Amino acid sequence: MMVGLKLEIEQGVMEGHKCFAAIYDFLMARAEKTFMRAIRSEVVGKARGRTLEIGCGTGASFPYYPDPSAVTATEPDPFMLQRARRRARLMGIPLTIIRARAELLPFPDSSFDTVISVFVFCSVQDVRRSLAEVRRVLRSHGELRFYEHVRYDHRWGALAQDAVTPLWQWLGGGCHPNRDTPRLLEEAGFRIVRLEVFKLDPPVPPLLFIRPQVLGVARPV
């Protein structure tokens, strides 16, 4: 049964975005050296118990875990995955990294105390299925800790995001700047117990399209 599940997972993962993976750390370098340090310390650094990170990308969150040995990280893109594994190896961080989609997590129900998501629900292929999977693998007392860019709460900003999404998605490894993640979380059966809204400066392209960002904690209802 597990062999069949593994095959289904491998067949379901994306082919990957080689060029985007190659430049991702460069694109994020300034952010990671500035405001993302505090964000990751808050979101990742407060993970407790058995922890799952979905969409770990190149592994930027790895150094922030208080107990890396309790962490399992997943990433569907093989080129991102390669870089994440290299980072963990070079830094001597003892966590488990596997290739899997958020839409099809290879874990039993109620497996984790904490799930971490940083810039993930914008780029998953099926956000509702991904959230259902996260809720499934979380224990009843568990929490989803997240940081995501989200849809504008006013008409013109949201229309601008809708207009740019096809091009943005093509350039940004499948990223959708217009997803209303807090609403989708509530629809998926989560109760948001903390939500802080940030707006990046300056409000000009390309930052304009991902300017609203949220840090939050949600628990299964």
Image (spheres, rainbow, N blue to C red):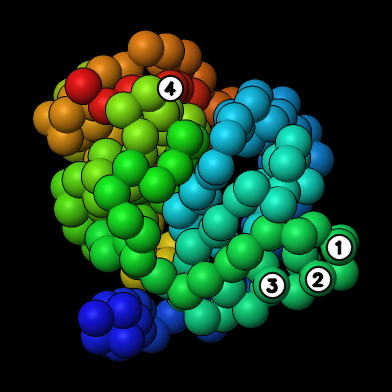
Q: From what the image shows, is residue 79 above or below residue 168?
A: below
Q: Give x and y (percent) for residue 79.
A: 56, 80
Q: Residues within 10 Å of mark 2 (few under 14, many from 20)?
A: few
For the residue marked with disc 1, what is the amino acid? Gly
Residue displayed at 73% across by 41% down = 67
The amino acid pointed to by label 3 is Arg
- Within-10-Å neighbours for mark 3: few <14, some 14–19, many 20+: some
Q: Residue at x 55, y 58 (%)?
A: 73
Q: Dots 3 and 2: beta carbons under 8 Å?
A: yes
Residue lying furthest right: 91
Q: Residue furthest left?
A: 187
Return the mark for residue 159: none
Which mark, residue 85?
3
Mark 3 vs mark 1, CA separation in Å: 10 Å
Q: Secondary structure at mark 3?
A: helix
- The residue indicated by pointer 2 is 89
Q: Which comes before the other along the chain, label 4 or label 2?
A: 2
- Residue 68, relative to residue 34: is it above or below? below
Three-letter code, disc 2:
Arg
Residue 47 to residue 87: above or below = above
Q: Which mark is residue 92?
A: 1
Residue 34, x across and y down, in percent: 77, 33
Residue drawn where x is 31% and y is 79% of the image: 2
Q: Secondary structure at mark 1?
A: loop
Q: Position of residue 130 (x, y in %)?
A: 26, 52
The residue under label 4 is which amino acid type? Val
Instruction: Name the element at disc 2.
Output: helix
* Measured Cα–Cα span from mark 4 to mark 2: 30 Å
